[in-house]
Image: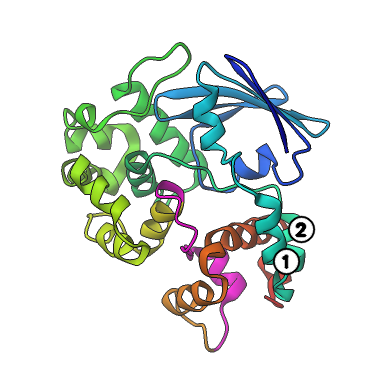
Amino acid sequence: MKITKDKNTLILTETECFSIEDTLECGQVFRFEKDGDGYVLHAADKFCRVSQKDGAVTVISDDPDFFFRYFAFDTDYPAMNARLRSFEELSAVAEVGKGIRLLRQDPFEMIISFIISANNNIPRIKGIINRLCEKAGEKLAEGYAFPTRDRLLALTAEDFAALGAGYRAPYLYEATRTVTDEFIAELIALPTEEAYKKLLTVKGVGPKVADCIVLFGLARGDSFPVDTWIRQSLSTADLDTPQKIRGYYLGRYGELSGLAQQYIFHYARNLGPSRLSQV
């Protein structure tokens, strides 16, 4: 990958393992919209326009350094992809999903967003989050920042419900009070499994949501969220619960478990879980 950077633009060429569409559309991020031949993306209190044409990626933002880190452009994804392809059962999956990158997102934003995501569909998740940002986020030159904890503390459970959060409204209210700066700092400092267990103490955070937060909010590759697609793809007579599936594949793929999970999720959602019977 070759990178050219100026004050407001990143241009990347020779992007063997990066697809904007596959990365944004694989369930790890919710604040983006199609914009012509690219996307407008919001993250924390930043936004960018990102497009991809003829193998070149262009990111336009007033903070290109933020998005360089956000898209993990400093990480050797071709090498990670090659390591996963060495597992025979992942050869086809890793080829189809090779453009996916794990975004480096804000932990607080991920905790709130994935509580909203529980038992929900992506269009509805995006709508609730967008309304939350409009109500409590700082106005940016385009769109809104994700609300800070201080801003969310001003909202009641009824306010969250009015945004369409449904039964998740009291969970969001409680999480805003539980997830302090100190809580986040401790999460970051803990080993992955301990961080996962700590997240399970937050109301509204179950095992799948905790794994998603660890993977997308703490950038811990040794995580393996098990949702319906993963269960349909990987269940066997022996691996007949989410906990067993999670434990087995964490042991098998180690620090690349999260990327493997995204490859399998992407493959299953686009090509069907029945085609993963060999995994």
In this picture the colour scheme is rainbow
Residue at left 49%, top 47%?
A: 121
Mark toward the start of the polypeptide (1 vs 2): 1
Instruction: Count neighbours of disc 1 (C-alpha within 10 A) and say few if under 14, some if 14 to 19, many if 20 or more.
Output: some
Which numbered tag is attached to residue 85? 1
Quadrant showing the C terminus: bottom right
Which residue corresponds to mark 2? 95
Residue drawn at the location 48% of the way across and 66% of the way down:
226
Up-down: is 6 above or below 173?
above
Residue 107 falls left or right of residue 71: left
Residue extending farthest to the right is 54
Look at label 2 and name its amino acid: Glu
Under circle 2, the secondary element is helix
Q: Residue 56 location in percent, x, y?
A: 77, 30
Residue drawn 18% across the image and 38% down it? 157
Can residue 119 be seen here? The reply is no
Locate residue 28 relative to residue 97 in the image: left or right: left
Going by the image, does 260 lie left or right of 255? Answer: right
Magenta residues, start to end:
216-237
Residue 62 placed where, x, y %? 51, 16
Q: How many marks?
A: 2
Residue 202 at what x, y percent from top left? 23, 55
226 in the magenta segment: yes
The amino acid pointed to by label 1 is Arg
> In the rendered structure, are the residues bearing label 1 and label 2 in contact, judged by CB atoms less than 8 Å apart?
yes
Mark 2, residues whose alpha carbon is within 10 Å: few (<14), some, or many (≥20)?
Answer: some
Which SS class for mark 1? helix
Looking at the image, which is closer to me, 72 or 113?
72
User: Up-down: is 4 above or below 73?
Assistant: above
Residue 128: give x, y in percent of width and height.
Answer: 39, 35
Among the 4 quarters of the image, the one containing residue 88: bottom right
> Which residue occupies 33% across, 62% down?
191
